[in-house]
Image: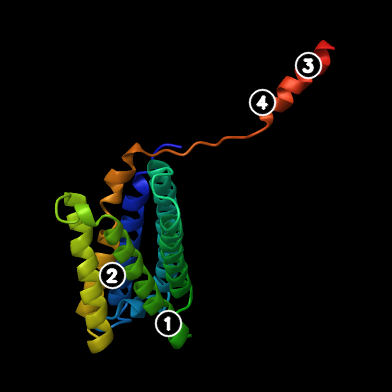
Amino acid sequence: MEGVSLLPLAAVVCSLGTIATSCGLATHYNHVPAYPQISMCGMLPPEKYVFSIGMTVAAMLLSAMMVVNHFRSEKLRGAAQPGAWAYLAGAHLGLGVSSTICLALMATVPVSEFPAPHVLFAVFFFALIILFQLLASAARLRDLFSDPKEIWKGVFMVLTLVGFVGWQSTGSSIAQYVAVASVMLHFAPYLFELRDTSLHLSVEGAGDAEQNSLLRDAW
């Protein structure tokens, strides 16, 4: 399947587009004050439906991208770094997928109805995704200051952390906007990294079954 490299772009556009649309609708219907917390833009209809569906789809796209990139990295690495590295790579993927599950749960649990679970899922999403980013940067430490893609990811990783800490410590909507935009823009360079990747479906045993059938016919 071609077009795998579009997964990062689709995730970024879907997430940021969903937030912009839901906040735009909430502002249009006077459901929120100026510079609202993003979660406030998913409390009332019609924006709550846009927010819930859009962020769930974004979480699925992000998770798919992480899985594809994991298997791509494992394929490129081969058996060159066995042992502890395999466990680290598995933990890295686990952190990433877990963060997207938290994102999807946060999107489907409105803050107006279930404030504590909604906030908890949001905090866990950021905590897990920041750990995911840190592990990815540590694995490519040699290229962190020379490869433009790694520099981009490093800058937005730091901005994600700064925005998240600022949001949690002050409750600032601006800090939240910085954290959300940065956490998604961090993945933009994967658009270029996955250009050499495509998915293929291989069905084992189909050829053998056909060959056995021909042999039986021959006898």
Q: What's the residue type where badge 4 is placed?
A: Gly
**Residue 148: x %, y % from top left:** 16, 50
Residue denoted by label 4 = 207
Q: Badge 3: how crowded within 10 Å, few (<14), some, or many (20+)?
A: few
Please rate how many residues cluster around mark 1, counting C-alpha atoms within 10 Å: few if below 14, some from 14 to 19, many from 20. few
Q: Earlier in the sequence, mark 3 or mark 1?
A: 1
Residue 214 in view in this figure:
yes
User: Nearer the N terminus, badge 1 or badge 4?
Assistant: 1
Instruction: From the top left corner, tell me how far across and down residue 198 is, in percent.
Output: 42, 38
Whichever of callouts 4 and 3 sits on the residue coming sooner in the sequence is: 4
SS assignment at label 2 = helix
Which residue has dot 3 on it?
Answer: 215
In the rendered image, the residue lying farthest to the front is 83
Q: Separation of disc 1 and disc 4 at Cα?
A: 50 Å
* 47 on left or right of 193: right
Q: Gap in Å between the C-alphas at discs 4 and 3?
A: 12 Å
Q: Kindly state the secondary structure of the residue where label 4 is placed.
A: helix
Q: Which residue is mark 2?
A: 180
Q: Which of the two marks, 1 or 4, is nearer to us in this view? A: 4
In the picture as drawn, the residue positioned furthest to the top comes out as 218
Name the amino acid type tagged 2.
Val
Nearer-N-terminus badge (2/3): 2
